[in-house]
Image: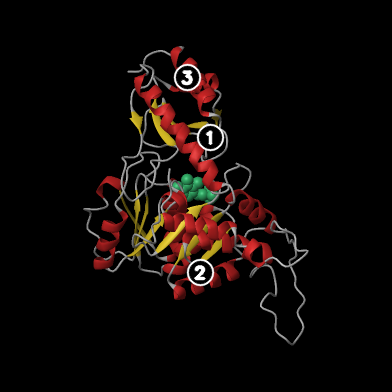
Amino acid sequence: MPLPDPIQARLLAMLHNRTDTLQAGDPVPEPLVLSSAFSLPQTPAPNRTYARFTNPTIEATEARLSALEAAPCLLFPSGMGAYSAALMALLKAGDTVLMLSDGYYAARNLVSDIMAPFGLTLRSCPAAEVLTTDLTGLAAVVVETPSNPGLDVIDIAALSARCRAAGATLLVDNTVCTPLLQQPLDLGADIVIVSDTKAMAGHTDLLMGHVASRDTAYMERLLSVRNLTGNIPAPHEAWLLLRGLETVELRLERMCANARAALPLLKASPAVQDLLYPTPHPQALDTGFLIGACFADAATADQFLKDAGFAAMTSFGGLHSSGDRRARWGDAVPEGFLRLSFGIEPTQALTENLTKALKNLPAAG
Ligand SMILES: *Cc1c(COP(=O)(O)O)cnc(C)c1O
């Protein structure tokens, strides 16, 4: 996964964000500041007043994320917190928003269940049709690429040109790729949403999300939404994210390498029927750490996770290889379908375990 120079420069800026400004005697890593109130004399007026607006640890984490996104960035307490604020800051009564029918289910439900009574309308189409469906009359288009769990790739530059022509704002959920592997804003998207709960934080121990955009007026409105809805994370969680971000490149490198090493084993195994893996596309630097694999039935899928030592859990992007049987969440996939997320285990030991686990399973289909 050799990163191109501009992305290396963003990573360097993220890692040197604090060290570039250290004074003698300063703590080198980012200190955690839990304070909710700040000294507030009449003059001079401080730019920090109260923690519902911001806090030094929140600012420090946002600065790291801004370096990675090469764009202004605001933090929210979860990916869905980021979605709700991003849509609230953008849309108004009477607007219609297009989302993927095979995208993250909670994003659709947010619009259809929570925002519909405020006058928003949801339209949906599968990822495979978003480059051909009619965009007339839409206020916004929200996509994920690769989609989840189908792992269909959408050409962001092509979609962004279509959205511009139709007068629709393009929002890209970049959770699966992260800003290291894919840069939607550079490809013409207006707004990026990321659930940092997944690979960005990477340790499966917190919820977090962010929104990034180079549209200054939009970011001002988004900050206003966050201030007035109180949709800001706690400093400790933000600090844990900051700590995770500093190793994100190393973790992603191993996670992607492990997925790459597992792919031929899964492909060759009679126990696996269909494999889903994103089609390599120049817009993403790597095909990532997620693989969809279909086993004979639910029991065989569960047996595989147990024998291979993969955690049976939802969510993805953590240190430990894991799998989620998506049919239990209502995704349109067979009962034996697993979305596998590869962790940072040593590659050889992991693939040996996988080989053993696959040998003991009945053939699929
Ligand atoms: C997990 C996820 C979300 C929601 O994020 P939370 O942090 O769980 O609120 C949104 N989009 C995608 C693609 C996700 O995987």
Q: Write down the residue under mark 1.
A: 343
The quadrant of the picture occupied by the C terminus is top left
Task: Confirm if mark 3 falls within 8 A of ligand 1.
Answer: no
* Residue 38 quadrant: bottom right
Give the label, 3 or 2, closer to the camera: 2
Which numbered mark, 3 or 1, is in the foreground of this view? 1
Mark 2 residue crowding within 10 angstroms, few (<14) / some (14–19) / many (20+):
many
- Earlier along the polypeptide chain: callout 3 or callout 1? 3
Q: Which residue is mark 2?
A: 222
- Nearer to me, 111 or 24: 24
Three-letter amino acid code of the residue under disc 1:
Gly
Q: Quadrant of residue 52?
A: bottom right
Q: x, y (%) of residue 9?
A: 48, 58
Which residue does the numbered mark 3 point to in the structure image?
A: 299
Residue 275 percent coordinates (x, y):
35, 29
Q: Quadrant of residue 157?
A: bottom left
**Whether residue 126 is visible:** no
In the image: residue 242, left or right of residue 336: right
